[in-house]
């Protein structure tokens, strides 16, 4: 039985608590820490059994009975808490991005190098999504031959509060980072070069924060494939999450999930349901699956499915995307 | 060059004139006869070249230069005109149904027996439709194994004028007759037994004519397969023409054609186009194709693709359908 | 907190145990009874906490602390156990069919009449399925107008062991009974008359048991709509569960669920995934939902969503279906 | 009646001859000129009636009875023949591209300025395709709000003979030029800036010709929308022609046409037909429609639907695409 402490009891911390309690064998959450925890959250935690609740995450770090830590706190604390946990001999599951700087992520990598038995997984949950995983599976099985063109469409249902932009580091670090990871996962290759074509077409207030809200991002992958991501902060029809990998022998494409397969035919046309609107709804199964695999890696000493390399590369690409916008030119990823 | 006379210059006669003129090699229309021909139709005919126009169809029967006749007159004249043409040594393409009685169709069959060189084709155009033909092709190629269940959905966009019912012989003879032929074509088998579950749900005036407007018709085919047709005289979304053949190794299904593949995603849902609304629009390509094959059979002395047997069986099944409604019981086809 | 005892720890009993433990608020399973319980099942039960395990279901009936009972035992015991539980003042969730005879179901109804505070729900889980529920919702909201034609396709991936047939009462009682309930649920109407067109096309051994394995079942509903169900004991592509309700203003149709939306385009065509193969996979969410609503009805004294009437009618229709096959004629439901 | 002369009796010249003869009112082809005309082509032309056949196109230019000319000769002669025809007072339909240089196209524009009554249409047939036209129609009708992101996928079934590259001017001038025109048509806006991410992934021999065979092309449109085209010279599943216009109120997307709607479900999956393989098959209806509209513009003195501006802009964008590859940088369109 793996004893887990969750640091950060916000939305995603709660998701992991529920996933582990209901769906993951060989693991239990024994403590939750959050400096801003409120009564509602305390009650929610209590409904999953006898779980300690702390204000200070250090109580989790220092708890000898805790084997693994989920770092679900605010992004600027991910790297330092991860390092503390690693040095305390705990396995770490860290939400994405690990940090907004390469330097701090490399510091985590250094800590891992010094603690070789420690598992460290990054929260790129989409890798575990049934649709995205089906693309990679088809590719791995040789069904489409060599990867030539990857296309990802990723559009949010609603833009964030513009104030969030300054905290998040902008669209490439808070939203596209998932797509960057998907590009690397689906083609099984790192990114070599990136060029961003972008604009402010959704909300001028986003532009005033120095960010963009609409982008077409094209990349060369290290394995020679070309890739393109198109992003928008707002799609009128909901959360749009599609991808297509085109190869020498064929193409594999995924479309959106919806609440049901119902289709209404009437004098207006033939109408199916909108995509699932909210990321928690759309990706719930993937949050469960990433926890299962993290626990499996810890308990059975297996390789984690999404390691520090993936976490570092996605941030490097996101930073290069920002640079491409600034320089109005293609940028190589180092 | 096959010289063709068209008897009956109504909607379908005009369709055949245009098909032959534009799309069929080795054939030309040299005469059209219609007792009710008007100036507009005369002008339409003239636009296709130097074509004789008669009031009396006998001028076509007696024209030695005419090799083949298309019988597109009113249904009650199909059989007698066909017999005259056959006896005059002309190939005949006869619109469906050949007649509303078995006796008259058998009289046509007798005339054919006495004139063995004559080609006689029935106007079951749907056999030549790209979608329906794809089902039969998959079946013939063994892709679904043995036929087990056939399903046909056939719904019209608008009910006919109730007055038409007394002329047409009712839904089974004017509308479902195509579906009966499809059932036999798609399973490559005759019908053995039929049971009709029907109602008047669209227009009470149809009921007052002694007919029904909504029906679920289930059949046993001679080859053992079960079949079902569902009919409605009015579908709010247009002309609904679908089918599915389920077999021991799989199923092959066809859906409706529409004007374009365009799909609109917005806050109301994900909406594609309605089916093509009108039968001439939906089946235009099949009208061309049946003419091509009729001319090919005449010119190259090949077997016609839809012969007198098909024409007779479809009427027998339609009459049995009426009997099943009257008796409220299953009825065997003789 | 509703204390629940589960009688019968077979496949479906385990499903309910898991659903309640993980997904249903305000309820807990406190006891499980099964005369054939084995070590594996004991271990499974124990993994959900401190739950009593009995051989004899009467220990559950007599347990004053148990508020509700799930009857998941073999079909021939459903009615008598339900009656005992009802008379012991316990709410009952009974798996389908309640019994294979009208008499025994009416005895349950009598027991309910005498115990008016007791909730009794039948396990027609498909009513809670996201797809089927979407049809009923669209109908209730007036989106398709009046119901005219209902079509249900229900095909199993594999036929049962022929020996099972004599136990189950045949295809209409063990398989189509769900479809009969769906027909009534989707049209919101009872069945008035039924005619069955059937054959043995999948496995001759099923015919030797006096049953059929392929059927087209057509019905008149009490509200005037026509309905048709097509059944096969084996579909080469998996579990086929589709439906369409056609009405005066439009039609609403549902298709199969699959593991992902992935579509492979290559030189063979454009290929999507097969339907989910197994009923537990396909309907898992509906098993959770029916439990939630049962518990809600018990705890908050609401009407159950699927009561004794539905359980009785489905069996009456199934028995009429058998009679229709025997008589080769349409049969009215009393 | 518009008398038309066709200059160039290759594949596309023959398509126009057939379209006009069979499907276009108020027009007839009276002469065809081609220096390389062979017996087969002479016979083909003769099958459409009494049409003069010349080796020298000047006989058409000088024929006073000819009102309009279709320039279907090799690309390097398009501009000069067009100018001759314009100056001879004939309307011109010119195949794309008008020329591979901006200078020569501007010379055609000058000739048009001097002959204001002359109609000049460019052969961008896709504007008349049912699918692409449906996108523009939805956009014009305000169904998607403001255009934000346009995506075009355009992949050929087979690469050309590498020797053709040096003649054609490369992928951007012979293949993508249609997509550039579509980008401008669908967004109703010119292109402002372009960046090309490209590679040789299909055939090294194409690279040896100095061209690329795989490309992701991203653009800023003058109206602010972002656009992306992905091209491949070879798709294993055939001719891939899709597009999606995403706007502030929704998105409209088109998928490929196929031979039928048939879908086979078996143990391998659920398989539909491949896209139509060949451009003549895929776009046949659009070739007819562009002729209808050209003739209508000539006969009824209307504005042509695709004028010299469109022809010039597409070439400017194609040349900028080549420059972007050479400079490895975004390039503005002048």
Image: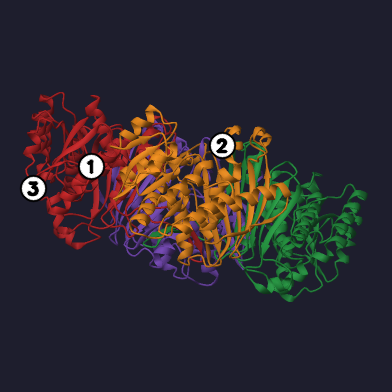
Chain colours: A red, B green, C orange, D purple
Residue C193 seen by the camera: yes
Q: CA distance from mark 3 to mark 1?
A: 18 Å
Q: Which element carries disc 1, helix, strand or loop?
A: helix
- Which x, y percent locates residue D303? 46, 69
- Which x, y percent locates residue C161? 58, 32
- Which x, y percent locates residue B329? 75, 56
The disc numbered 2 marks a residue on which chain? Answer: C
The residue wearing badge 2 is C236
As rendered, which of B294 and C156 lies closer to the eye?
Answer: C156
The local crowd at label 1, few if under 14, some if 14 to 19, many if 20 or more residues have their Cα within 10 Å, is: many
Q: Which element carries disc 3, helix, strand or loop?
A: loop
The disc numbered 1 marks a residue on which chain? Answer: A
The residue wearing badge 1 is A16
Q: Which element carries disc 2, helix, strand or loop?
A: loop
Q: What is the number of the mark on residue A35?
A: 3
Residue at the extreme right of the image, as rendered: B114
Residue at image coords 79%, 53%: B311
Does mark 2 fall on the same chain as mark 3?
no
Q: Is residue B154 left or right of residue A161?
A: right
The local crowd at label 2, few if under 14, some if 14 to 19, many if 20 or more residues have their Cα within 10 Å, is: many
Task: In the rendered view, tell whether residue A24 sits above or below residue B290.
Answer: above
């Amino acid at each position: 039985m793996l004893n887990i402490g969750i640091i950060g009891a916000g939305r995603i911390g709660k998701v992991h608590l529920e996933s582990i309690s209901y769906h993951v064998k060989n693991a239990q959450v024994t403590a939750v820490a959050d400096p801003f925890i409120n009564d509602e959250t305390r009650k929610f935690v209590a409904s999953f059994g006898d779980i300690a609740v702390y204000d200070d995450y250090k109580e989790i770090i220092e708890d000898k009975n805790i084997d693994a830590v989920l770092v679900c706190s605010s992004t600027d604390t991910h790297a330092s808490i991860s390092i503390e946990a690693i040095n305390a001999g705990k396995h770490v599951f860290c939400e994405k991005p690990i940090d907004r700087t390469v330097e701090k992520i490399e510091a985590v990598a250094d800590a891992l190098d010094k603690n070789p038995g420690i598992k460290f997984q990054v929260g790129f949950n989409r890798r575990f999504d049934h649709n995205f995983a089906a693309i990679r599976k088809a590719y791995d099985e040789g069904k489409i031959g060599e990867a030539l063109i990857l296309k990802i469409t990723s559009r949010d249902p609603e833009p964030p509060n513009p104030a969030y932009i300054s905290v998040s580091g902008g669209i490439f670090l808070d939203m596209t980072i998932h797509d960057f990871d998907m590009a690397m996962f689906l083609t099984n290759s790192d990114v070599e070069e990136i060029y961003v074509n972008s604009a402010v077409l959704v909300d001028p207030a986003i532009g005033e924060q120095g960010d963009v809200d609409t982008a077409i991002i094209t990349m060369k992958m290290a394995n020679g494939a070309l890739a393109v991501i198109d992003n928008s902060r707002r799609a009128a029809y909901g959360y749009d999450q599609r991808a297509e990998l085109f190869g020498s022998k064929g193409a594999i494409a995924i479309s959106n999930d919806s609440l049901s397969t119902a289709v209404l035919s009437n004098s207006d046309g033939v109408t199916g349901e909108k995509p699932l609107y909210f990321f928690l709804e759309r990706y719930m199964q993937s949050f469960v699956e990433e926890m299962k695999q993290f626990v499996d890696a810890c308990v059975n000493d297996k390789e984690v499915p999404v390691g520090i390399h993936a976490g570092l590369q996605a941030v490097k690409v996101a930073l290069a995307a920002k640079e491409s916008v600034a320089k109005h030119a293609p940028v190589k990823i180092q």
